[in-house]
Image (tube, coloured by chain):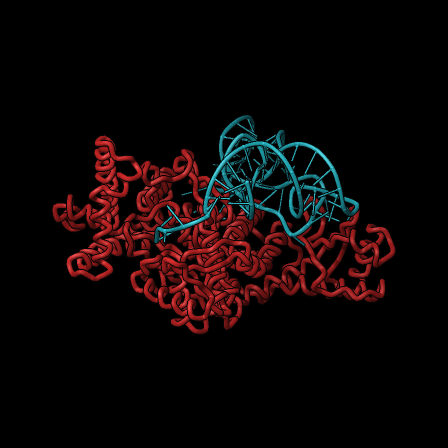
Amino acid sequence: MKLEQTLKQQISQAFQSLFDYELGVEKISLQPTRKEFAGAYTLVCFSYGKISKKSPEDTAKTIGEYLVQNTNKVVVGYNVVKGFLNLEIADGVWIDLLKIISNQPDYGQLPVSGKEVMVEYSSPNTNKPLHLGHLRNNFLGYSVSNILKACGHKVYKVQIINDRGIHICKSMLAWQKFGNGETPESSGKKGDKLVGDYYVKFDQEYKKEIAQLVEQGTPKEKAEKVAPLMLEAQEMLLKWEQKEPNVYGLWKRMNGWVYDGFDATYTQMGVDFDKLYYESNTYLLGKDIVEQGLDKEAFFKKEDGSVWVDLTDEGLDEKLLLRADGTSVYMTQDIGTAIERFKDYPKLSQQIYTVGNEQEYHFKVLFLILKKLGYAWAEENYHLSYGMVDLPSGKMKSREGTVVDADDLMKEMFDTSTAHTKELGKIEGFSEQEASDLYETLGLGALKYFLLKVDPKKRMLFDPQESIQFHGNTGPFIQYTYARISAILRKAKELGYEPTDTHFEKTGTLESTEQETIYLLSEFENKIKEAAKEYSPAIIAQYAYDLAKGYNRFYQEVSIFNEEDEYKLHFRIAFSKVVAHVIKKGMDLLGIRVPERM
RNA sequence: GGUCCCGUAGUUCAAUGGAUAGAAUAGAAGUUUCCUAAACUUUAGAUGCAAGUUCGAUUCUUGCCGGGAUCACCA
């Protein structure tokens, strides 16, 4: 916040008057002082020796002395360890800082930037239910959206639904052949699960056919191509493209089931979208764009009629955009979708694609193609690439049945949080509804925090048995801190204390836990900016944890209502209120709710 | 093979080129007449290997070793 800026300006002036040197404020970096030393901010002075013509230690001392003399009692002391200049800040400065923050009801919301961005996430296929990987994807995309909003941007949350293609036809075919008219209503199954089951069924039957063919002497590779089921599925896809009523009707019906199922899962996850895009609507547009690109000579046609883009100048390969028969590929669709989105939202300055890191190459190519087509905005596009979620048994593989289903996992989380909460006897006086809300808040909070606290770029390990904890660096730990503060604020209200700032200046001295925590509070908006720049909710997660930990230490060491000094008592209530606000806002950025009681 | 990513306590995660590499968990030992012990305190434990750049390297460069992804007329 402002304090850091003030210090930097003073340091810049110190260089001017001490060493007659122009050191830009933007070149000065202050870091928080390590706990074992006195002070709050540290200036590393090793590199200034050339400017000051002194040893790092003497440089640091000279600057420290200057700051104490010239900062009007902001810097009240300093110490130098080797070349590290640790600056001690007056308690009054921290108190003022808290006052400023507590007077900002929307602290953590930066001013409107005028920038519009689109964040794509989830983007499932409609032949399978959502799984653990989708959870990381959705939580990430949703959280990044919130973080960008907090930065003042206008954010559109979207997803592209892969609702067409051979995979859907497989489910449809299996359902036709083996389904006996089963519907979500008749079987009580969730729609996405039901369709997913038929996708599996297809695969099983298909394998049987292959095995049979192989037994009859057909080579395996050929068998995979000529198995009757596969041929039928391909025929179905053609019929779909021609919008043959039977096939098209069935497609609509089964996709409808899937969407109902997905909606239920998204609601449970607590994520939503501003607009949905369907591949069945955009894939044709992609074709047109490719044709246009051909006219502009951005692409070229091979003898067989297939269309390619040459990316060898960019160090990549040639990439197919349209097959010889004129049908589109994955890339074609993504080109169409990207352009459609900019038509829908002309003021958009950036698209962010939340997609797993196995598609890094794909997006590299996509952005290059868009650039070749002359779209200036292509430069700003960003692939929010995240690592895979591994299980202790290794990679999730649907064929081997090692996929962790999203609904099942969330259910399990609720069960665990329910059991745990009951065991602790924490739900006295809760209505049934309140209690089940709490279980959800905690279970989902634990899960989201677990998936978001890790740097998105990194692969992570998820052990369903052990990963989700309620102690330590977890969602519930932070939620618990919030609930504790809420209890204090409730009690303060009962006792008639209003957390006002009228007498902040009379607070006097601060406890070290208070000072450290106020420092953290002052860093909140910086952290939001950093998280936005890195597209990393993990930064917010880490921050929220540090803040909660800091407050818990304060809570343990310092009493509020037993404090005899009324001014201090008031100050601590106001202080607690600000911490609660920042925790709530921070968790909000992660898409995690916080309970008033737990 | 080309390209890219990753190797940090037993385990899961941190660390704009900065100080004695932080946490959590599991382990050991403590703290409830006091605002919620889902908390707090103490303790033990780690940078794959080898060079280089630097006052200073987990971070940057190179090589090696190990793990993963990708290089589809699949999506």
| Chain letter corresponding to the colour cyan | B
Of A513 and A347, the residue lying toward us: A347
Of A514 and A414, the residue lying toward us: A414
User: On screen, A499 above or below A550?
Assistant: below
| Chain letter corresponding to the colour red | A
The tally of labels here is 0
Of A424 and A446, the residue lying toward us: A446
Q: Position of residue B43 (x, y in %)?
A: 63, 31
Of A343 and A493, the residue lying toward us: A343
User: On screen, A210 above or below A564?
Assistant: above
Residue lying farthest to the front in this orientation: A303
Asked whether residue A38 is in view, the answer is yes
Residue visible at 32% across and 60% down in the picture: A326
Question: Is A493 displayed left or right of A516 in the figure?
Answer: left
Residue visible at 28% across and 51% down in the picture: A166
Question: Is A260 displayed left or right of A107 in the figure?
Answer: left
User: On screen, A158 above or below A410?
Assistant: below
Quadrant of the image for the N terminus of chain A? bottom right
Question: Is A483 displayed left or right of B41 in the figure?
Answer: left
